[in-house]
Image: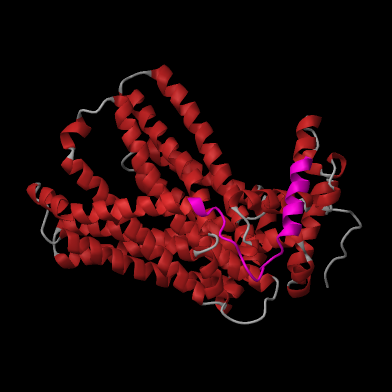
C-alpha cells in the first residue's frame, strides 16, 4: 500500500503564481523574481492557447528549415564532388585501395551490432531495471580502478591517480546518490515497458543512426575535399582566418548531428506523450515522426543551431587554449580556460533545457521559444526540479551508448582483420566504435526522452500518471514535498 501524501501544497496554478508561493524564486532580487513570475504566467497562457495534440498543426519556425537545407545541399554536393580527389590524395600517401570499403563495411556492421546490443539492454531494463541502473552507475568507477591497477607497472603515479578517482566516484555513488537510485530504477522500468509496447521506435533509432553516420561521412569528405583543393591557402591562413574556418566547420558538423538527434528525440517525445494521455488509435510512432519531420522540423533546426553555435565556439576556444599552451603563454592559457568553462556551462544549460522544451514541440506543436516558456512555467510551478535532480537516467543512456560503441568497435575490428592489413584493422575499429556510439546512443536515448516526457507532462497534469502508475506518481509527490519541508 502506498504511503499517504502529507498535506502540503507542492503544486501552484501557473496563472496564480507569485513570488511568495514559488520556492525556486526565493532568495533572488525582487525585481528579477517578478519578471520570472510574469514569464511563468505568459507560459501558462501559451499552454492554455495551445492544447495537447491538436487536430491541425501549423509549421513552426519554418524559416530555419531553409538555411539548414541549404547547408545540407552544399555539404552533400561538395562531398560527392570531392570523393575522387580525396581518394586520389589518400592514394598518394600510400593508403590502401580497399580502405574506403573497410570504412563502409565497418560502419555498417558496427552500427548493426550496436543496435542489437542497445536493444538487448532495453529488454534487460524492462525485466531487470535494478541490475541495469546499478551497472550503469558502477561501470565507469570500476573500469577506472581496473585501468589504474593495470597501469601500475608502467606508471605508478598514473595508476594511483586512476584508482583514487575510481574510489572517489564509488564513494559519491554510495554516499550521495544512493537515495536517488530507487526512483531511477522505477522510471527506467516504466520507460522500458513503454518502449517494448512500441517497437517502431527502434526503427526511428536505426534511421537516426544511419543519418548520423552518413552526415559524419559527408562532412568528412566535404572538409577533406576543400582542404585538398585549397591546401596552400588554408595552410598559410592567419590565426583569425583559421579559427573562423574551424568554427564554420564545427558549426556545420554539430548542426547536422543535433538535427538528427533532435528529430529522433521529438519523435520519441510524441510517442510517450500519446501514451501519457492515452490517445486512441494506433500509429503512435508514425504520427509522431510525421510531426517531427514536418510541422516541428523548423523548431528542431532552430534549437539545434543554437546548441551547435555554442559547441562550435567551445571547440574553437579549446583549440586556441591548446595553441597558447604550446606557445608557452600562461596568461592567455588561463584566460581561455576560464572562457572555455563559461561557454561549456552555457552549452550544457542550453542543451539540457532544449531537450525539455522539445516535449512541448512534440505534444502541442509549439514553436521553440514558446515551448521553452511553457516548459519553464510548468516545471517551476510543479517544483519538478526537486525530482529532476534525483533522476540518474542519463547514466543508463551513457552505459547503453558506451557498450554499443564497444560492440561496434569489435565488429569494425573484425572487418579490418578480415581484410588483412594492420592499418585497416585500426581504421575499422575506430569507424565501428563511432558508428556504434551513434546508433547505440540513438537507441538508448529513448530512455532519456521517455523520462523527460513523462515528467514534463506530469508537471502539467498528474492525473494520467496517477491512474496508470500510482507508485511512480506517489514517489514524485513525496520527493517534492520532502524537499520543500526540509
Q: Position of residue 221 (x, y in %)?
A: 24, 52
Stretch of the chain drawn in magenta: 37-63
Q: Residue at x 71, y 49 (%)?
A: 385
Is residue 67 among the parts visible in the rendering? yes
**Nearer-the-camera pick, 457 or 476:** 457
**Quadrant of the snapshot with the C terminus:** top right
Q: Position of residue 485 (x, y in %)?
A: 85, 47
On the image, which quarter does residue 54 sit in?
bottom right
Q: Position of residue 364 (x, y in %)?
A: 65, 62
282 left or right of 11?
Answer: left
**Quadrant of the snapshot with the N terminus:** bottom right
On the image, which quarter does residue 434 sit in?
bottom left
On the image, which quarter does residue 129 sit in?
bottom right
Q: Residue at x 16, y 33 (%)?
A: 232
> Is the image coloured rainbow, by chain, by secondary structure, or in one colour?
secondary structure
93 left or right of 479?
Answer: left
Image vertical order of residue 192 relative to residue 80, above or below: below
Residue 112 shown in magenta: no
Amino acid at each position: 500500500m502506498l504511503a499517504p501524501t502529507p498535506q502540503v501544497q507542492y503544486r501552484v496554478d501557473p496563472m496564480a503564481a507569485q513570488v511568495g508561493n514559488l520556492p525556486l524564486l526565493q532568495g533572488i532580487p525582487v525585481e528579477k523574481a517578478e519578471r520570472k513570475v510574469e514569464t511563468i504566467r505568459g507560459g501558462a497562457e501559451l499552454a492554455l492557447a495551445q492544447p495537447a495534440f491538436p487536430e491541425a498543426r501549423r509549421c513552426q519556425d519554418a524559416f530555419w528549415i531553409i538555411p539548414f537545407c541549404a547547408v545540407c545541399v552544399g555539404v552533400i554536393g561538395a562531398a560527392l564532388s570531392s570523393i575522387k580527389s580525396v581518394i586520389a590524395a589518400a592514394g598518394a600517401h600510400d593508403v590502401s585501395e580497399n580502405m574506403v570499403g573497410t570504412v563502409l563495411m565497418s560502419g555498417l556492421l558496427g552500427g548493426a551490432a550496436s543496435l542489437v546490443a542497445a536493444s538487448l539492454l532495453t529488454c534487460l531494463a524492462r525485466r531487470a531495471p535494478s541490475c541495469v541502473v546499478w551497472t550503469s552507475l558502477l561501470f565507469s568507477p570500476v573500469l577506472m580502478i581496473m585501468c589504474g591497477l593495470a597501469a601500475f607497472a608502467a606508471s605508478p603515479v598514473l595508476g594511483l591517480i586512476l584508482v583514487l578517482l575510481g574510489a572517489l566516484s564509488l564513494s559519491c555513488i554510495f554516499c550521495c546518490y544512493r537515495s536517488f537510485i530507487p526512483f531511477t530504477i522505477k522510471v527506467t522500468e516504466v520507460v522500458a515497458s513503454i518502449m517494448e509496447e512500441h517497437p517502431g521506435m527502434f526503427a526511428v533509432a536505426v534511421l537516426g543512426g544511419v543519418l548520423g553516420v552518413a552526415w559524419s561521412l559527408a562532412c568528412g569528405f566535404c572538409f577533406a575535399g576543400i582542404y585538398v583543393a585549397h591546401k596552400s591557402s588554408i595552410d598559410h591562413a592567419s590565426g583569425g582566418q583559421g579559427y573562423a574556418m574551424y568554427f564554420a566547420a564545427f558549426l556545420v558538423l554539430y548542426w547536422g548531428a543535433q538535427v538528427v538527434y533532435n528529430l529522433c528525440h521529438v519523435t520519441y517525445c510524441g510517442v510517450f506523450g500519446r501514451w501519457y494521455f492515452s490517445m486512441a488509435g494506433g500509429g503512435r510512432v508514425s504520427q509522431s515522426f510525421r510531426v517531427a519531420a514536418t510541422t516541428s522540423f523548423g523548431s528542431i533546426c532552430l534549437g539545434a543551431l543554437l546548441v551547435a553555435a555554442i559547441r562550435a565556439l567551445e571547440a574553437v576556444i579549446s583549440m586556441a587554449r591548446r595553441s597558447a599552451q604550446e606557445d608557452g603563454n600562461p596568461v592567455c592559457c588561463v584566460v581561455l580556460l576560464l572562457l572555455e568553462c563559461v561557454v561549456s556551462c552555457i552549452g550544457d544549460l542550453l542543451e539540457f533545457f532544449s531537450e525539455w522544451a522539445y516535449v512541448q514541440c512534440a505534444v502541442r506543436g509549439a514553436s521553440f521559444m514558446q515551448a521553452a516558456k511553457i516548459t519553464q512555467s510548468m516545471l517551476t510551478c510543479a517544483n519538478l526540479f526537486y525530482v529532476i535532480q534525483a533522476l540518474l537516467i542519463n547514466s543508463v543512456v551513457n552505459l547503453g551508448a558506451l557498450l554499443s560503441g564497444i560492440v561496434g568497435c569489435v565488429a569494425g575490428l573484425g572487418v579490418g582483420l578480415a581484410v588483412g592489413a594492420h592499418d585497416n584493422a585500426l581504421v575499422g575499429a575506430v569507424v565501428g566504435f563511432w558508428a556504434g556510439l551513434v546508433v547505440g546512443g540513438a537507441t538508448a536515448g529513448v530512455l532519456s526522452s521517455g523520462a523527460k516526457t513523462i515528467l514534463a507532462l506530469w508537471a502539467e497534469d498528474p492525473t494520467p500518471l496517477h491512474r496508470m502508475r500510482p507508485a511512480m506518481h506517489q514517489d514524485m509527490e513525496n520527493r517534492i514535498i520532502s524537499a520543500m519541508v526540509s
